[in-house]
Amino acid sequence: MTITGTIHEVNGGPALPGVGVQNTRTGDGAYSDADGRFLVYAEPGDSLRMFMLGYKDSIYPVQNETVLIHGTLAPDLSQLNMVEIVTHRSYRKLILGLLLFGIAITLAKWKST
């Protein structure tokens, strides 16, 4: 049967576009549109998993009369490890700085002899 619904952030938050909605039995699914709406196929006894990066997954069981689900996702506030991003330009500056430092040391040694 066809299941439709909407997905919002918890506590009356905004509609969430791009949320994955997957039938856990079949693996089939869809993504919510710009207004948080989705349409998937499921049978009674199936479960729908709703997931999105930055949010905790939610599971909704499909009952005999289920045709409309209003799902919610809660932000996942877990701490991530620090990531350092080095751009090509800053890498070139580092190499140039090390090269100039090496030249300065060489010149200092040359002047001292």
Image (cartoon, grey):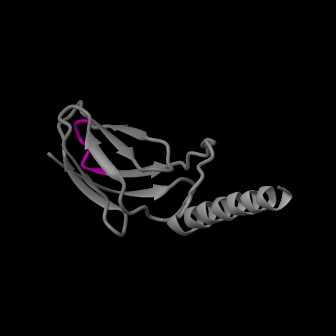
Residue that extends furthest to the front in the rendered view of this protein: 113
Work out whether residue 50 or residue 101 is closer to the camera in this orientation and state it. 101
Residue that extends furthest to the right in the rendered view of this protein: 112
Work out whether residue 93 or residue 33 is closer to the camera in this orientation and state it. 93
From the viewer's perspective, is residue 32 above or below residue 61? below
- The quarter of the displayed image where residue 62 is located: top left
From the viewer's perspective, is residue 41 above or below residue 100? above
Residue drawn at the location 38% of the way across and 63% of the way down: 17
- Lateral position of residue 89 relative to residue 5, left or right: right
Q: Could you say where residue 109 lies in the image, as x and y percent from the top left?
A: 79, 55
- The quarter of the displayed image where residue 58 is located: top left
Work out whether residue 106 or residue 65 is closer to the camera in this orientation and state it. 106
Work out whether residue 18 or residue 10 is closer to the camera in this orientation and state it. 18
Q: Could you say where residue 24 lies in the image, as x and y percent from the top left?
A: 26, 34
Residue drawn at the location 24% of the way across and 30% of the way down: 45
Residue that extends furthest to the left in the rendered view of this protein: 1
Q: Could you say where residue 19 lies in the image, as x and y percent from the top left?
A: 36, 54
Residue drawn at the location 63% of the way across and 42% of the way down: 79
In which quadrant of the rendered image does the N terminus lie? Answer: top left
- Lateral position of residue 50 relative to residue 3, left or right: right
Q: Inspect the magenta stretch and tell me whether residue 58 lies in it.
A: no
Residue drawn at the location 24% of the way across and 41% of the way down: 65
What predominant SS class does the magenta segment belong to?
loop
Q: Inspect the magenta stretch and tell me whether residue 66 lies in it.
A: yes
- The quarter of the displayed image where residue 43 is located: top left
In which quadrant of the rendered image does the C terminus lie? Answer: bottom right
Stretch in magenta = 63-68
